Image (spheres, helix red, strand yellow):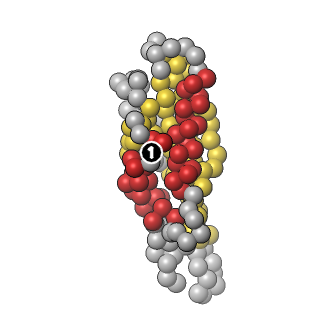
Amino acid sequence: MSATANDVITALLAQLPGVVALQGVAIVDGPPLQADQSMVSTDRLFVGASADQRGLAAEGSNEGSPMPGVIDVDTFSVACLAEAWTGDTNPASRRARVFEIRDAVRTLIRPSSAMIVLGVQGLSSAHVGAWSLLQLQTPKGIYAGLEFRIDCEARPSTV
């Protein structure tokens, strides 16, 4: 059986709260509520969430083989959204903060050669991929968001 996007999201939610660089960051399973500004002074990391209105948590594909005994490969991306708010109107520090949050995730998923990626059986690789920076001036101050993908490749543990 191959690792799935659900396995990766579950592993991230279990491991991210223990990352020192993310202390004080609210780790959230899934997307923010529409127009949720209740935690304006809190940095947040949404796992399995994107900034768009479709509710995209992950997307992927399977490269199957018609040859018997050849292992299929699942490739997928898990969507994440880092948010940082402040009460002022200077966006530089908030932009820097969302990249710090993303980099903490990058460090977590970068295994040594002897480790199973994120502790997920069948997950052969994971890395931070494409990203998009968002910033807005709001009545409650500057908002910066960094939408990024964790690109994964999974192979079944057995054929």
**Residue 1 visible in image:** yes
Give the number of callouts.
1
Dot 1 amino acid type: Val
Left or right relative to 25: residue 112:
right
- Residue 131 vs 15, above or below: the answer is above
- Residue 30 vs 38, above or below: the answer is below
In this view, the residue in front, 56 or 39, is 39
Mark 1, residue position: 20
In this view, the residue in front, 156 or 24, is 24
**Furthest residue to the front?**
20
In this view, the residue in front, 70 or 130, is 130
- At x 47% / y 20%, what residue is drawn? 86
Tag 1, which secondary structure?
A: helix
**Furthest residue to the bottom?**
68
Q: Quadrant of residue 148?
A: top right
Q: Quadrant of residue 113?
A: bottom right
- Image location (x, y in percent) of residue 132: 62, 37
- Image location (x, y in percent) of residue 97: 54, 32
**Residue 59 visible in image:** no
- Image location (x, y in percent) of residue 14: 37, 54
**Furthest residue to the left?**
38
- Residue 68 vs 26, above or below: the answer is below
- At x 46% / y 71%, what residue is drawn? 121
- At x 50% / y 14%, what residue is drawn? 88
Q: Residues within 10 Å of mark 1 (few under 14, many from 20)?
A: few
